Image (tube, rainbow, N blue to C red):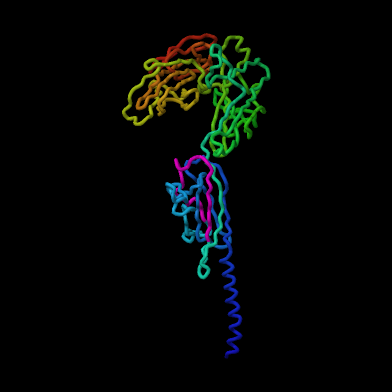
Amino acid sequence: MRPTHAILSGPFILLMASLIIFEETLWAAEPTLTFVDWQDRASNDTSLRIGGKVAATSRALDEVNVIITEPGGQNWDGKRWCTKNRRAKKPCRGFRVPILSTDLSQLDRPEWFSFERVKEMPSGKNLPEGTYSVTARANDNLPPPYDKTITNYKQIRVLIDRTAPKIGITSPLWTPVEGRGQHHLPEDPYIMRVEAGTKYSFPASTGTAADTGPASSQSGLDRVEVHIVRQVDGLAWDRQRLTWTRTRGSPFCTARSASWSCSENLPRGEHLPSGKYTIYAHAYDKAGNVSKTFQNVLVQAREALDQGVPVPASQPPTGSPPARPAPPEGEVKAGAKPGEAYVIAMNPELKGRLGRLVVAFPEGFNAENTRTYVFKEQTEVAHFDGNKTMELLPGTYAVAITGKRVEGVTIQSGHDTKVKVGALRVNAGKDTRVYLLDSDKTRELAHGDGTQELGFPIGTVHVHIAGQTDTATIEDGKITDF
């Protein structure tokens, strides 16, 4: 029997040896990581997000550690940044502190690990602007008799940039107003005077854009988007279809350089009637921050000027509702005082530093077509339609309603500031064109066909119909019928 046993045991011993060699080869193989959506990126998040997932191609991973390092070299321990220097104020127990250590065998698919599982990420004051390194380490823990860990890792960099880029329009520029010298308001238009009946074109727009903030946290300029909007109806110019459209989804022009220009396929001829238009320019950086600016353009046909008729905005379709007014260019009441243009009253419900601006039109008045703009140091901070109560930081603001502007409106902590407003109702037939003018009888505030109902600050508005002009007085809390 011994010879037979020897014959059988030979192959058996050979097979066992092969299995041991194969097993040792399998365990000794360094885990190969496959990363999905795991790459350098820029972000303006207030909490660090890394996303993506990892898999082992050789065998299931045993463990994944995630280590986050801030620009100064400290690591995140789940609650704070810490250093390996034991004499430092915030030492770490170990230098490369993983904020997460996961046993992948507990997951539904242990061969995959999603980085979205990482919690307790740095945020708020613990996440200042700068470049952070995020390291993922994959561990393959070999069992006895090997008793060792094979590790592979991959590192990405996340740039936190919350500073918006700068954007400016260099052409066209506002037209100087007589008596104001070089002083101008953001809404002052570029006045384009043309010969009626000629094939004139909307002016080309140029400008500059640049990323801002500390050099160490600049993500870089991504793009500039430009829109042209017709103020009478809010339509935007579509350069592909060469017409005005109700959607602003696609910009009229997109540029990728710091010095940008938009000069092709501009509205012209029949697509550019006399009226008010606005060029909006938006600058985006690679972290997603955005800034914007605008320049109004007023197209005036010489034929209308020669006749002394107020220049209308672009003609809306017959029977259309009253047009929403353009950004304000109207009468300026400098240095308004409480009691004259607005009243301030304490509001015990307000706590903390904020105050409230209140714009409330008379009862029974449909204020949906009345637009209000709020400015702080010549920069628009808000706009809305109809009645509105909004919280603002203490300070001095300008409030413009249907183009008539009240300067020096004060917001105080714990107080309500109520702007004195009324309404004007012009009763006219559906085929009658009505122009509403400011105090100098030349600057148009709004226009439309048929009955017009719009809100204004208290004061005087001039109504122009069929070449004749008359005065309407706006009173606080009242509807003035004309």
Q: Residue furthest right?
A: 199
Position of residue 78 relative to residue 28, above or below, is: above
Of 436 and 4, nearer the camera is: 4
Depicted 100 relative to depicted 7: above or below: above
- Numbered disc total: 0
Residue at x 52%, y 35% (from the top left corner)? 163
Q: Is any atom of residue 71 visible in this view?
A: yes
Q: Is residue 478 above or below residue 243?
A: above
Residue 359 point in image, percent of width and height: 41, 23
Residue 218 drawn at (x, y percent): 56, 38
Is residue 137 or residue 74 the one in the foreground? 74
Q: Report the magenta residues as a range.
A: 113-139
In the displayed orientation, state which residue is furthest to the front.
Answer: 87
Q: From this viewpoint, which residue is outermost toward the left?
A: 348
Query: Can the viewer see residue 247?
Result: no
State left or right for residue 353 relative to residue 325: left
Q: Is residue 197 left or right of residue 353?
A: right
Q: Residue at x 63, y 35 (%)?
A: 256
The picture quadrant where one finds residue 11 is bottom right
Query: Does residue 282 show up magenta in the picture?
Result: no
**In the picture, which quadrant includes the C terminus?**
top left
Q: Between residues 215 and 102, which one lies in front from this camera angle?
A: 215
Foreground: 402 or 48? Answer: 48
**Which quadrant of the view contains residue 193?**
top right
The N terminus appears in which quarter of the rendering?
bottom right
What residue lies at 55% left-to-right and 39% top-to-bottom? 216
Looking at the picture, how far across and down is residue 267, in whole percent? 64, 25
- The percent position of residue 313, horizontal first and vertical second, equals 56, 19
